[in-house]
Amino acid sequence: MHAERVDFTIVLFGASSDLAARKLYPSLYQLARWGQLTGEYRIIGVGRNDLSHEEYRLQVAEKIRSFSPGAIDDETHFAGFTGRLFYVMADIEHIEGYFRLRNEIMYAEGKPGVCSHLLFYLSTPPDLAPHIVRNLHQAGLGGKEMSCSGWRKIVVEKPYGSDLKTAGELNAVIGSAFNEDQIFRIDHYLGKETVQNILVFRFSNGIFEPLWNRHHIAGIEITIAENFGIRDRGAFYEHAGLLRDIIQNHGLQLLASVAMEPPVDLSADAVRDEKTKVLRSIRLVTPETVDRSVVLGQYEGYRKEKQVDPDSRTETFAAVRFFVDNWRWKGVPFLIRAGKMLAETVTEIVITFACPPQNFFGPAESCSYTANQVILRIQPEETIAIRFGVKRPGELVITDPVYMKFDYRDTFSQPGMTPYHRLLLDALDGNQMNFIRQDSVEYSWAIIDAIRECVADRMPEVYSAGSWGPPAAGELKGSI
Ligand code: BG6
């Protein structure tokens, strides 16, 4: 058992948030059930509602039962877990609640002082994060104010700011109360098994890496598609839009994982150094290049969603062609396309290799038809496929594409770990490899801000639900 998973307190801001209900409480309970959290750990929920500890426990129990019904297989153990939940009412923007929190921590620890191991988890809208950090600091709970040997960490959910300026301000506020090695900025994509595997697939195999560059790869396409809309998140989405909700974080992190150089070792910073270099090398979109690099869409019916402006110009689809200006990738297009209400829910990365210099076998256009591809399917199927051409049986010599496929489910038994299980354990353990470093956040925002400035006057093209977005996106794809 890892030493840092014993005797700690998790303080959860946003105790009644949707994320807490759907992901955090069930994950914490399951980790406890699997014996991954031990000792005298406690979870303190912080929220606006006036609840007793008992009422909070009942609410959390109800949420776990409704969102993860299969998770509870032992009522005695479950009761032991809920007994570790405590509640503090606080108005996030005012200091009083933080003093109550401090007292609760002292009381729960049963010893004077707040020298315990504390993990603050911010599952709150981004504009509240600076208030929380300032107030923690003022209440003596900040990361730099430890008077004895406990550890302190802060986990911040995305969105991390809403542009470069606000992310920079947030970094400055958090940085004044916590050191970078105490800050865990979540992008839950980095907790996915198939995303973590990108590094292993690339750097534990000798056959791909020599070809993984501009000399052999014609283009890379990253798709993050969902076949549902914004659900009940109208207010958030109106402000965010697809570029900020998906491309700034999940999209660019996938791109960085596929494009990074091998790290000098497997330390968190060595890996993050290489990802940051990729983000830094991405060519910014300009008014001259925007028309051939960016397609935005809005699904038909979006304007009728709850809490959405009937004249909204918010994009629910984006396709962006990026170039990574470094020695490995110069000139290779990286297309990221992502959207809501598309034909399918699928996340995948398709690496298309250059055609052989001569095509002896028909049909004449067979190069793009059979071009070699490595297809990393992140979800819902978790597979890796390699495409290559073979002779179609028969008299004519014609090539057809075929696939060799590896499927996680066929080869490994499912451990049941989700991104939140992994990332919660990593944060407790202090392993930052799969969390976003400050410089990466800022480079990613600079990339998105440049696009947003160029498209400020654009009305996204309306696309029908169940399609693959505006047809113009296909033309960006065609240019790979
Ligand atoms: C979140 C976005 O970060 O990721 C959502 O805010 C999106 O809009 C979700 O639906 C997708 O996550 P996943 O893991 O289901 O692909």
Image (tube, grey):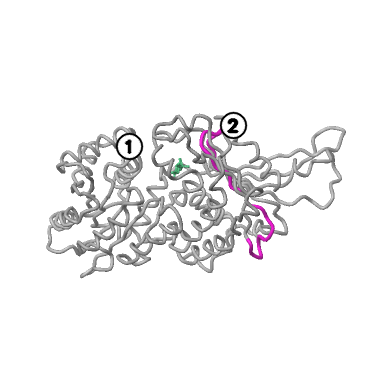
Task: Tell me: residue 268, above or below residue 294.
Answer: below
Left or right of residue 474: residue 142: left
Amino acid type assigned to the residue bearing label 1 in the image: Ala
Left or right of residue 220: residue 248: left
Which sits in the foreground, 242 or 41? 242
* Label 1, residues with CA under 10 Å away: few <14, some 14-19, many ≥20: some
Q: Is residue 329 magenta?
A: yes
Which sits in the foreground, 34 or 4? 4
Task: Tell me: residue 72, above or below residue 284.
Answer: above
Q: Secondary structure at mark 1?
A: helix
Q: Majority secondary structure of the magenta segment?
A: loop
Amino acid type assigned to the residue bearing label 2 in the image: Ser
Q: Position of residue 12 (x, y in %)?
A: 27, 50
Q: Which residues are magenta?
A: 325-347
Residue 125, which numbered label?
none
Which sits in the foreground, 188 or 407? 188
Q: Can you tell me whether the CB of the residue at mark 1 lies under 8 Å from the nearest atom of ligand 1? A: no
Residue picked out by circle 2: 467
Residue picked out by circle 1: 71
Q: Position of residue 200 (x, y in %)?
A: 54, 56
Q: Position of residue 113 (x, y in %)?
A: 15, 64
- Residue at image x 67%, y 61%? 330
Q: Is residue 148 magenta?
A: no
- Residue at image x 84%, y 50%? 358
Q: Secondary structure at mark 2?
A: loop
- Residue at image x 64%, y 62%? 325
Left or right of residue 271: residue 327: right
- Can residue 347 be seen here? The reply is no
